[in-house]
Amino acid sequence: MHVEEIKKGIKDSWAVGIGLVPLGLAFGLLMVQTGFDWWWTPIFSIMVYAGSMEFLAIPMVLQGTSVAASIITGFMVNFRHMFYGLTFPRHRINSGPGKVYSTYALTDESYAIVS
């Protein structure tokens, strides 16, 4: 990778990164306040990886929502990503692992920056 490209990427995305800090803190606080141990927070974040769905997952887990209902809810909440994926400029990513990661890591904020 070229150092200049990395610097440009940081310049384009630093505000989004900083903006996600309060969201992460709020999620961690909510997890602990609802009775989960602190270490469940990174597990939820890694397994769910969808901000709005992470917040919805807390009451769904606490209430014992069925797996089918959870999957349907997750699909409906994140359906907008289908449209993001269709128009995301993956042709600009040269490596196979980079394309896979960019598909996985696609968020509202990253889509807005790239678009």
Image (spheres, rainbow, N blue to C red):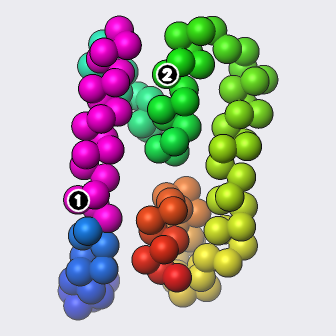
The residue that disc 1 covers is 18
Is 54 displayed left or right of 22 in the figure? right
Is 45 displayed left or right of 107 in the figure? left
Residue 51 at x, y percent in the picture: 47, 44
Is 99 displayed left or right of 38 in the figure? right
SS at mark 1 in the image: helix
Would residue 41 be counted in the magenta stretch? no
What amino acid is found at the position of numbered circle 2 in the picture? Ile
Would residue 33 be counted in the magenta stretch? yes
Q: Specify the segment rendered in magenta.
A: 16-35
Residue 115 at x, y percent in the picture: 52, 82
Q: Is residue 91 above or below residue 36?
A: below
Q: In percent of the image, x 23 and y 59: which residue is there?
A: 18
Q: In percent of the image, x 71 and y 67: which residue is there?
A: 83
Which numbered disc flags the more N-terminal residue, 2 or 1?
Answer: 1
The residue that disc 2 covers is 58
